[in-house]
């Protein structure tokens, strides 16, 4: 009888130690994720400021080229130059996104994209597709979303996810490509307004 009690005591101690170890690892992982996110914010803000600054410099250059001309031809040239500058900024940003590291902050972005998609679709019973580059990242965060599954099919995109409700009635494109396309008109309009050009 005493040996059973000793065995139970040993098992209880092992389980308790294991539980404490797991909880410590989870807390450590959560702390690391928060630190990574906190550390990334200034860098992202700096990159954003640089893109805006570069865009402003380019727009200033364009504005100086067209100052003094008020006819339609000058306005058309201004619009074309602005469009070219905006396209250049977008092209640079797309290159940076395509070559971005797919760890740490990127997995937090994927979590956010999945969370947004489930809210927009109004269901957590979803099938997620992505590109081959993001597949492992999506798979690694999927366990945090009950009812979500990763499709075996991949497709071409910069990054992000395409989400479909499991019943097939709803789809939401939350790829980086789609998000950029949704923002392009607003960014163009904002830049144009800052430089007094009507689009």
Image (cartoon, helix red, strand yellow):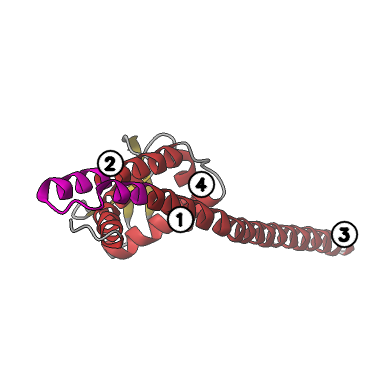
Q: Position of residue 135 (x, y in %)?
A: 43, 39
Residue in the foreground of this view, choosing between 53 and 129: 53
Which region of the structure is painted magenta?
A: 58-82
Q: Nearer the viewer, mark 3 or mark 1?
A: 1
**Residue at point 25%, 61% (across, down):** 196
Classify mark 3: helix, strand or loop: helix
Instruction: Say if mark 1 contacts mark 2, CB within 8 Å.
Output: no
Query: CA–CA distance between discs 4 and 3?
Result: 43 Å
Number of other residues with Cα within 10 Å of mark 2, as a class: few under 14, some 14 to 19, many 20 or more: some
The residue at which mark 2 appears reads as 84
The residue at which mark 3 appears reads as 3
Query: CA–CA distance between discs 1 and 4?
Result: 10 Å
Q: Of label 3 and label 1, which has the lower sequence position?
A: 3
Classify mark 4: helix, strand or loop: helix
Residue in the foreground of this view, choosing between 168 and 43: 43
Instruction: Say if mark 3 contacts mark 1, CB within 8 Å.
Output: no
**Residue at point 30%, 57% (across, down):** 191
Q: Of label 2 and label 3, which has the lower sequence position?
A: 3
Residue 172 in sight in this render? no
The residue at which mark 1 appears reads as 111
The residue at which mark 4 appears reads as 140
Classify mark 1: helix, strand or loop: helix
């Amino acid at each position: 009888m005493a040996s059973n009690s000793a065995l139970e005591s040993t098992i209880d101690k092992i389980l308790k130690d294991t539980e404490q170890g797991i909880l410590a690892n989870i807390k450590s992982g959560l702390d690391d994720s928060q630190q990574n996110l906190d550390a990334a914010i200034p860098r992202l803000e700096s990159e954003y400021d640089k893109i805006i600054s570069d865009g402003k410099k380019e727009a200033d250059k364009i504005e100086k080229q067209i100052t003094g001309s008020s006819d339609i031809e000058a306005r058309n040239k201004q619009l074309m130059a602005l469009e070219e500058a905006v396209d250049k900024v977008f092209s640079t940003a797309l290159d940076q996104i395509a070559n971005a590291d797919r760890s740490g902050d990127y997995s937090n972005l994927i979590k956010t994209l999945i969370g947004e998609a489930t809210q927009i679709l109004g269901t957590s019973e979803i099938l997620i597709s992505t590109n081959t580059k993001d597949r492992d990242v999506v798979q690694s965060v999927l366990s945090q979303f009950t009812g979500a599954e990763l499709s075996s099919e991949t497709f071409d995109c910069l990054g992000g996810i395409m989400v479909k409700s499991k019943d097939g009635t709803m789809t939401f494109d939350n790829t980086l490509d789609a998000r950029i396309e949704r923002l392009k008109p607003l960014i163009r309009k904002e830049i144009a307004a800052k430089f007094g050009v009507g689009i």
